[in-house]
Image (cartoon, helix red, strand yellow):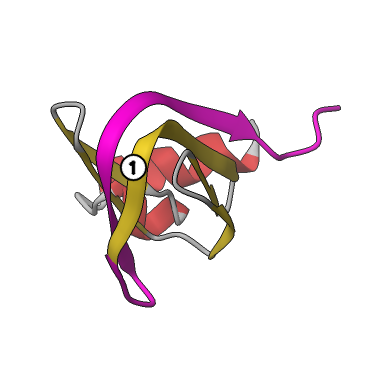
Amino acid sequence: MEREQIRERLASAASMPKDVVMGASVVTMLGDFEVCIENYRGITEYTDSLVRVQTKGGQIRLTGRRLQIEYYTNDEMKVTGKIQTLEFIDGRNRE
C-alpha cells in the first residue's frame, strides 16, 4: 500500500480533514472569476494571463485575462479575473 493511501485511510479513521493529514491543497472556485487556494508552497509565475502556484503534489496553473492576485498569506491566496482554465500538473515522480 502506498504512503498516500495510508494517510487517506488514517484521515478517514480519525475523522480528520484530508487536507490536514495529507498536506493537500484546497482549491475553491467561484464561477469563472475567483479562485482561492489554500495550502500552497509558493507562486512560481504571475502575469495578467497566467498564474502558476507550487503545491506539495505539483503545480496549479491558471490561465485567463486580467488575472490578479487579490491577496496572499502563508496559507491562502485569492486570484481574480476572467479564468479560462485551471490545471493540476502532477510534480511527483512515478515509478
Q: Nearer the viewer, residue 87 or 2?
A: 87
Q: Nearer the viewer, residue 27 or 85?
A: 85
Q: Quadrant of the C terminus?
A: top right
Q: Position of residue 84 (x, y in %)?
A: 36, 22
Span colored in magenta: 71-95
Answer above or below: position of 11 versus 72: above
Residue extending farthest to the top is 84
Answer above or below: position of 17 versus 74: above
Q: Main secondary structure of the magenta part?
A: strand
Name the residue at 45% across, 36% down.
Answer: 62
**Is 88 within the magenta?**
yes
Q: Nearer the viewer, residue 27 or 48?
A: 48
Q: Position of residue 31 (x, y in %)?
A: 13, 27
Answer above or below: position of 56 versus 5: below
Which amino acid, by three-letter code, is at mark 1?
Arg
Name the residue at 46% across, 59% down.
Answer: 40
**Is 6 within the magenta?**
no
Q: Quadrant of the N terminus?
A: top right
Give the residue pinned by disc 1.
Answer: 66
Q: Position of residue 81 (x, y in %)?
A: 26, 41
Q: Position of residue 63 (x, y in %)?
A: 46, 31
The quarter of the picture where residue 56 lies is: bottom right
User: In the image, 30: left or right of 75?
Assistant: left
Residue extending farthest to the left is 30
User: In the image, 84: left or right of 58?
Assistant: left
Density class for disc 1 (Cα within 10 Å; few <14, some 14-19, many ≥20) is some
User: In the image, 79: left or right of 74?
Assistant: left
Q: Nearer the viewer, residue 47 or 12?
A: 47
Element assignment for label 1: strand
